[in-house]
Image: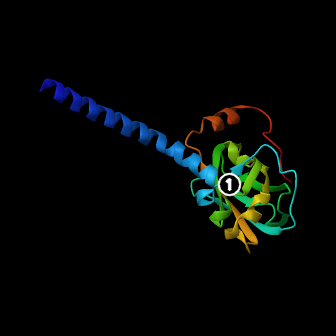
Amino acid sequence: MAVSNRRVATLVAGIAVGMFALAYASVPLYRLFCQVTGYGGTTQRAETAPDHAIDRWMTVSFNADVAPDLPWSFRPAERSVWVRVGEPVLIRYVAENLGREAVVGTATFNVTPSKIGAYFTKLECFCFTEQVLKPGEKVEMPVTFFLDPDLAKDRHLDGLGAVTLSYSFFRAKSQEGARTVAAAPGPLGPEVN
């Protein structure tokens, strides 16, 4: 009888540990799933652009939002661009700290329609790191991307001619970087005139 109770206790403990491990891993696994599949408009990331472009053009529009607790102005430098699929494109967003203290911001992003996420690939993006702006500081934030030529093989994208890349900036949970920047002399990053 004691052996049976020990087995049940071991089984229950194993299930509890397994559930805890699954809960702990669920966010990174979901993020990985979204990055691999483009689910929910999650874009891809690459080190190099494709070696060829195809004869298909699309309009890429840009959107920018800022959370109410972040005293920044944030906008795309251009509202849209006409891109050839497979060619890298450099665009810029402009951010300005309208507040009276240095603030760390972090950006989230997605593309719509969400089915294009698997083919929208970034080479460089300010969204990969937290951004710190001093009071009154205005900077350009570059994004280099391309639309993967493999999108031409996806029949669900036939006829799609427009994509929107959206960013939302939020106040970062940790403002330690803002305190460090506020204490340092001199400008931070390129200023925009």
What residue type is disc 1 on?
A: Thr
The residue nearer to you, when weighing 34 against 126, is: 34
Quarter residue 133 falls in: top right
What residue is shown at x 80% (from left), y 68% (from top)?
58
Query: Where does the image place residue 121, in percent across and percent down from the top left?
Result: 74, 53
Which element type, helix, strand or loop, lies under badge 1? loop
Quarter residue 128 falls in: top right
Query: Where does the image place residue 111, in percent across and percent down from the top left?
Result: 67, 61
Question: What is the total number of numbered labels drawn onto the structure image?
Answer: 1
Quarter residue 84 falls in: bottom right
What residue is shown at x 73% (from left), y 31% (from top)?
184
Residue 11 appearing in the image: yes
Q: Is residue 57 left or right of residue 11?
A: right
State the colouring used for the structure image. rainbow
Q: Is residue 30 above or below residue 118?
A: above
Residue tagged 1: 43
- What is the quadrant of the C terminus in the image? bottom right
What residue is shown at x 75% (from left), y 67% (from top)?
61
Looking at this rendering, what residue extends furthest in the top direction?
A: 2
Q: Is residue 106 above or below residue 78?
A: above
Residue 169 appearing in the image: no
Q: Is residue 132 above or below residue 164?
A: above
Query: Where does the image place residue 168, in percent across and percent down from the top left?
Result: 63, 57
Query: Where does the image place residue 132, in percent across and percent down from the top left?
Result: 69, 42
Q: Is residue 138 above or below residue 9?
A: below
Q: Callout 1: 10 Å neighbours few (<14), some, many (20+)?
A: many
